[in-house]
Amino acid sequence: MGRHLAVLLEDIPHIRLLYTGETTHTQGERLDLTLVSSDLAADAIWQVHPTLTSNHFATLTSLPVAPPVPPRPPPRWNIRRADWSRFQASLDEWWADYQPPDDLHQQERDLTAAIQTAATTAIPMCAPSRRHQTDWWYYNDEVREHNHRVNLHRKLYKKRPNPSNLRLLQEVVARARQVSLRVKEDKWLEWCATFSQHTSLGQMWRSVRTASGAAPPRPAAHPHPQQEAERLATTFTSRGSSDQLPLHTRRTQQLQLHHDEAIREAMEVADMTDRPFSLQELQQAKRRGRDTATGADGVPYSMLAHAGPAGDTALYARKYPQVCKKISTGVHRKYPQVCKKISTGVHSRDITDRLTPPTGSLLLPELGLPPCCLPPERSTWRYWFGGHSLVLPHS
């Protein structure tokens, strides 16, 4: 069977069979195949392991591919050294001259750019850094084992800090340093033995920089990264096409627009109990305390908290969007006429999700939505819109 597959696979482009003619089974007529892409087949090494643990011999495939170079992390603002008075003054100047356009997305981009400009003026940047292992050129199993022992004894001393464990930790650390120095010296002598009159000066300097702790630049993980990325993108696009979805899923997508329209019509009904948020509630809703991970724009919650009174007034007067959400109602598979919960993508700069709305229907002027209400005698469904209770009809 393996030989028939080998004949068929030889005609497929971009695939290479690694086979040297050695027997991989106790019975010679059977064959185990190893497939690799054509880009990796040039330096691939294929061999049969001599140890037999079943009726098949184990095969070893070695691919000498260097690890990718880790990208540098994006620059970050040092919030601990921020000059918030200068930050707020810069935003106040921007609010005074800003004329909000009609496009909601353009308002969001303008606000993000203004916050980033004010942060660049008033907040210093953190020093860029990239961690790399300086011991990669001599690291082996012996060094790894002693480092593991050091970690175990450090945990033991942290759990039970007594003089006995301290002396034991010091002995283990001293032993690990001796092993690392010995292995480093042996590896350096091994490198020096390979130098000759044919060794280039650049290679010698690269070895010296590596031994001194500076990691050399590494090649790309793939010989042709651009072509491979385009091939993967094409494959992902074809496999992720909606035409391959089941029939009931495509039917659900077709009903999505009708359910969205039903929700919009329900939100246009006014009610006397609806009221907007007050400026005090808006100020109390700001998230304070420790910042969490920022989004793609790099704006943390602390920058929004220090926007100042002008920013609160502009937010309350709807001069820029406080929330960017897209309603996605979903459709029940068995009962298409039943509405499901609203699924919303909350923007990273949403600071009003923590507000508690009144019971029943809700007026959302800050979201740019009309009020929504229902008579109490009708059956209703209660939805959650980014933390706000929303009452919609259910038939």
Image (spheres, grey):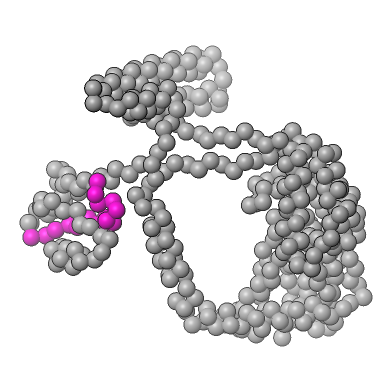
Q: Nearer the viewer, residue 313 or 50?
A: 313
Visible in this render: residue 51? yes
Would you identify the image quadrant in which residue 10 lies? Answer: bottom left
Q: Nearer the viewer, residue 69 or 177?
A: 69
Residue extending furthest left? 28
Query: Main structural element of the magenta stretch: helix, strand or loop?
Result: loop
Rendered position, 369 above or below 334: above
Check if residue 352 falls in the magenta segment. Answer: no
Picture residue at 68% right of the left edge, 39% below the top: 77
Picture residue at 21% right of the left edge, 46% below the top: 45
Instruction: Please indicate whether residue 347 sits to the left or right of residue 199 in the image.
Output: right
Look at the image and tell me in which quarter the C terminus lies. Answer: bottom right
Q: Which residues are magenta?
A: 29-43
Residue 350 coordinates in the image, percent (x, y): 75, 57
Picture residue at 83% right of the left edge, 39% below the top: 86
Instruction: Please indicate whether residue 118 sits to the left or right of residue 143 in the image.
Output: right
How many labels, in total? 0
Picture residue at 85% right of the left edge, 43% below the top: 89
Rendered position, 114 above or below 250: above
Visible in this render: residue 386? no
Q: Nearer the viewer, residue 262 or 72?
A: 72
Residue 213 coordinates in the image, percent (x, y): 44, 25
Instruction: Please indicate whether residue 72 sits to the left or right of residue 328 in the image.
Output: left
Residue 52 coordinates in the image, percent (x, y): 14, 46
Residue 92 coordinates in the image, percent (x, y): 86, 48
Look at the image and tell me in which quarter the N terminus lies. Answer: bottom left
Check if residue 30 falls in the magenta segment. Answer: yes
Instruction: Please indicate whether residue 65 sits to the left or right of residue 278 in the image.
Output: left
